[in-house]
Amino acid sequence: MSDQLQLIRAAVRKARPKPAVEPSAELPVARVAVDVPLAHLDRPFDYLVPEGMAEQAVSGARVRVRFAGQLVDGFILERAAESEHPGRLSPLQRVVSPEPVLAPEIAELARAVADRYAGTLADVLRLAIPPRHAAAEAEPSPEPADPPAPPEPGDWARYEAGPQYLHALAAGGAPRAVWTALPGPAVGDWPVLVALAVQATLAGGRGALVVVPDGRDVARVSAALDAAVGAGRYVALTHELGPAERYRRWLAVRRGGVRAVVGTRAAMFAPVRDLGLVVVWDDGDDLHAEPRAPYPHVREVLGLRAHLAGCAALIGGFARTAEGARLLASGWARPLAATRAEVRRAAPLVRAAGEDAELARDEAARTARLPSLAFRVAREALRHGPVLVQVPRRGYLPALACERCRALARCPRCAGPLALASSHAVAHCRWCGKPAGGWRCPECAWARFRAQVVGARRTAEELGRAFPSVPVRTSGRDGVLATVPGEPALVIATPGAEPVAAGGYAAALLLDGWALLGRPDLRAGEETLRRWLNAAALVRPASEGGTVVVLAEPSLAPVQALIRWDPAGYAERELADRSALGFPPAARMASVTGPRPAVDDLLASVELPEAAEVLGPVPLPGNREGTPQERALIRVPPARTRALCGALRAALAARSARKDPDSVRVQVDPLELV
């Protein structure tokens, strides 16, 4: 037995509740998952159920127990007639509520997610179970509605296997598909198709769960579900809901009164009864990555749910990720796509304008930083409808440099990047917020700035001067528009904040492609193509004059994939390249982040599986005040993922048992690898 396992077992024995009451047949045992996120205590603990609590202490109920001298919360995982613990057991202190909020299938899923991400069950349950609201719990939930009628294929007929997929859902099958959605300007195009899939699942007597990136997508899918199945057969779960309303809707799902859920990331653990379908829309969006421990991703969690429940899965988007391509290559899922002829009918015309030898001859175009091609397309399109302008960065001038030597302008106090909020503002630091009114370049002593990156507000100002008679609307972090009318206007939006235009945009300009493609990130090309496709999908088809102009080097692979509208081909090439280089998803990676001594200690103590490779540690870029952070990457083949996560959990448990002062963050499959 290893020293680590001895330490863990000793710590578990030490942390067990103190003996208080002998077990007996009249006081059965409750196995409780205590809300203590220490890695060395990640296991159920047995408690006695006092006679007065026997009826209320049901599996899944919230309880209060005494643990290590303190009262803590917990959930009853199951009831048992006896305990394997040789000593005496403490009794439950209180049943907070007899409502069985933790369903057995969610407990199983939470344990699987914790193991998959080298985390603890307590951390996953905090993500899965919303806080209790007593008043909402006392209210009755609606009775389940009768199943709807099976839907007609509708626009699913535009896809080669679309009607068959719907039929399999209605018949109770479990088809799994990676769906490459057709572009289309109509409001509710892809949401209508998702709603039809949910309707087919409900018609077969099973439940459905749909997870989308943000609240605007929830609203669009909700509108489509209202038309397809009616308002009483589903609920929407988002962070915008108050705690009482969110818990009320969640209880309606847990009690079986509602069989379908649409929501954002937090809804991935929704306790849908008889789950028959899980849907992820736009799985490459970083909003699907949970920022709290153990950092699960929606696509992975719903893939686990589909496996555990034996249900259908639909992973869709206008783009396709390398992870989606790997699911297809492994045979876990089948492609769901339209023919090339159908794609050509639906897609806009895409043209590329490089770095512009000919920055437009027109003075107004030069002011707006538009190449001649983009300026002509925008001017012509504004006669027929709105024009979308996608800008990679928000703000006014979010990055500044010395006008003379081009060195990046940094804060004299903390070395953070300087930015401008408006044309009349003083430069300020984006890290500490301090103004830098007397700034001089440390390299050449020059005192004037130039724009390193131009943001959405500055772009809107410049385009307003270039097209003085056209309304300019902005959509971004300061205010996101859901829709815009179909009248001529310039709509300036950051990626992910593009509003839907009534009847579709007449054209779209995708500016500053270098800012997206030049990021030092493994997924830069894939993410850039995803953002471009999401914006271009809102433009009218080429047959109706829809045109997209992308400002990037035409020979680059993401630009060529956009021009041909070939996200599947790009994803396959990306997967092949990453397989050759040993990068995710062809390999699994775990990042270990913390102070250098703590990272070194964990790497020295962890028993890594065979074929594991350690990269680093190296200092993290952008370290600010405080203890410098470093990161090491551990790479293994996909078949060794379980062994890697188990080894990391054991090492974290040993550190937790020793009460090591410096914390270490372990993240399996981090979204960003810079």
Image (cartoon, rainbow, N blue to C red):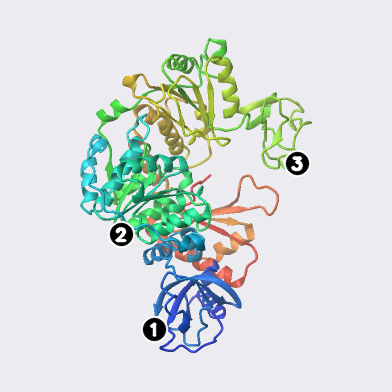
Helix, strand or loop status at disc 1: loop
Dot 2 surroundings within 10 Å: few (below 14), some, or many (20 or more)?
some
Q: Amino acid at mark 3?
A: Arg
Q: Are marks 3 and 1 in contact (CB under 8 Å)?
A: no
Residue drawn where x is 60% and y is 25% of the image: 458
Q: Are marks 2 and 3 in contact (CB under 8 Å)?
A: no
> Is residue 34 toward the left or the right of residue 100 in the image?
right
Residue on which disc 2 sits: 274
Helix, strand or loop status at disc 3: loop
Q: Position of residue 87 (x, y in %)?
A: 50, 88
Residue drawn where x is 41% and y is 29% of the image: 536
Rendering quarter of residue 271: bottom left
Helix, strand or loop status at disc 2: loop
Q: Nearer the viewer, residue 563 or 347?
A: 347
Q: Earlier in the sequence, mark 3 or mark 1?
A: 1
CA gap, disc 1 and disc 2: 29 Å
Q: Amino acid at mark 2?
A: Asp
Q: Earlier in the sequence, mark 1 or mark 2?
A: 1
Rendering quarter of residue 336: top left
Which is more foreground, mark 2 or mark 3?
Answer: 2
Q: Is residue 150 above or below residue 652?
A: above
Q: Is residue 649 above or below residue 341?
A: below
Q: Position of residue 535 (x, y in %)?
A: 43, 31
Dot 3 surroundings within 10 Å: few (below 14), some, or many (20 or more)?
few
Q: Amino acid at mark 1?
A: Ala
Residue on which disc 1 sits: 81
CA gap, disc 2 and disc 3: 58 Å
Residue on which disc 3 sits: 413
CA gap, disc 3 and disc 1: 65 Å
Q: Position of residue 181 (x, y in %)?
A: 33, 37
Q: Nearer the viewer, residue 320 or 223?
A: 223
Q: Position of residue 656 (x, y in %)?
A: 58, 69
